[in-house]
Amino acid sequence: MKRRNQIKIQKTGEDSAPYRINGNGSPHKVRFIDLFCGIGGFRIAFERAGGECVFSSDWDKYSRITYKANFGEEPHGDIHTVAVADIPKHDILCAGFPCQPFSIAGVSKKNSLGRKHGFDDERQGNLFFSIADILEYHKPAAFVLENVKNLKNHDKGRTFDIIHRTLTDSLGYTVYHKIIDAKSVVPQHRERIFLVGFRDYRYFEFPEFSSEGPKLGSILESNPLPKYTLTDHLWQYLQNYAEKHRAAGNGFGFGMVTERDTTRTLSARYHKDGSEILISQGPHKNPRRLTPNECARLMGYPANFKITVSDTQAYRQFGNSVVVPVVKRIAESVIKSLQRPADYQPDLVLRCAERTRENVHAPNPPKKMARYKISRTNK
Ligand SMILES: C[S@@+](CC[C@H](N)C(=O)[O-])C[C@H]1O[C@@H](n2cnc3c(N)ncnc32)[C@H](O)[C@@H]1O
């Protein structure tokens, strides 16, 4: 379904503030680049946090159409064809780099096709190194990377280890990482890993997300078109498929939800049969899929986001995207860290017994960071 005549997204955030690192230099907005930009989830989030996008890149024809419709400019194409020196100077590099080579679904599909995965996937796996090249050349003050949760376990942890060591030991960034579930800001269980890095050591905390969140009813349309209701044929097929796997002791099946629920993770394959998120329409009617507009809201996109591509492409694009309010909160925390004095530390309570370095790696962290868990005092 094509949707037109919608209001265009504001290019700058309403709360955008001038920016200086450590109070030095002339004030300017935080400049960020949007790599593997898809339809601009990072861009909306960072603009709303006060940033200004100075470069974007994605090679997918249909994502570029959506991006242009909403931001008024077409992203650059294949990142391999862009000379690193031609990328403008920036303060923050943002990249939700392609997850297929690292995701469980991607790995098993590729294995079954007899293909390689992870860094052995020559076409996709080396995209991380495009990011590393840009970091090495431009040395931005910070970066925010996003990927599937499985990045941490892929290839028994070796993939993450290589990424982490490249960012820290080779490039010298202090890196924090955390798996965040978007369910506190949208009615969707969606766990993604975020890596935040600072060129110079900086104190940084990921924002806290509550374990409670909105329910599906808050984003459902009241009168979705009949085409979103499953045909008898498809509904029967999904039930048979689920039954077959139940009998074999497997957990595969459809994910039926009501307005009181949180959905499973929306995937880029949702257009195929919609089975991961089916909305119950009562006992006398087949369930339905989410509409593309509901997918937009499930990913936290603003109501005025324009969808000018086919349903199939729209489902793919939202399924590949980031949850905008999650990234917005991370963006605010990163910008706050950059605006503080470089040696900022909050008032600390040092608890030797609870020492942990799990989520921070700094090449030369202050001794306190290296040896103790740090928590704020309650003043
Ligand atoms: C996981 S999606 C990122 C989605 C994005 N973060 C968003 O919010 O919409 C990865 C994107 O990388 C793009 N991509 C893959 N290989 C690329 C390449 N060589 N150059 C540029 N973009 C590429 C894909 O087209 C896809 O849109």
Image (spheres, rainbow, N blue to C red):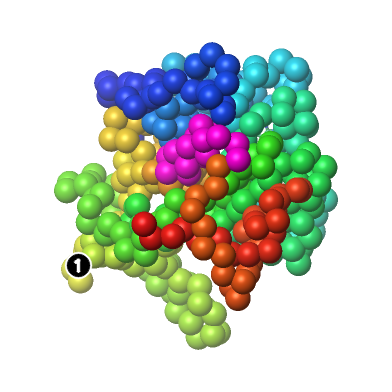
Can you give x and y, in whole percent of width and height, for residue 60 in the image?
A: 59, 31
Q: Quadrant of ligand 1?
A: top right
Residue 14 vs residue 64: left or right? Answer: left
Q: Nearer the viewer, residue 174 or 88?
A: 174
236 lies above or below 130 = below
Q: Quadrant of the C terminus?
A: bottom left
Identify the residue at horizontal 75%, vertical 48% (top origin).
364
Identify the residue at horizontal 47%, vertical 42% (top origin).
333
Q: Is mark 1 within 8 Å of ligand 1?
A: no
Q: Secondary structure at mark 1?
A: loop
Residue 23 shows in the view? yes
Identify the residue at horizontal 78%, vertical 39% (top origin).
171
35 lies above or below 300 = above
Can you give x and y, in whole percent of width and height, for residue 88 in the image?
A: 65, 17
Identify the residue at horizontal 51%, vertical 63% (top origin).
349
Q: Quadrant of the N terminus?
A: top left
Report if residue 342 lies within the magenta region: yes
Residue 224 vs residue 66: left or right? Answer: left
**Amino acid residing under circle 1:** Gly
Write down the residue under mark 1.
Answer: 282
Residue 291 vs residue 76: left or right? Answer: left
Can you give x and y, in whole percent of width and height, for residue 179 in the image?
A: 54, 58
Q: Which residues are magenta?
A: 328-343
Report if residue 238 lies within the magenta region: no
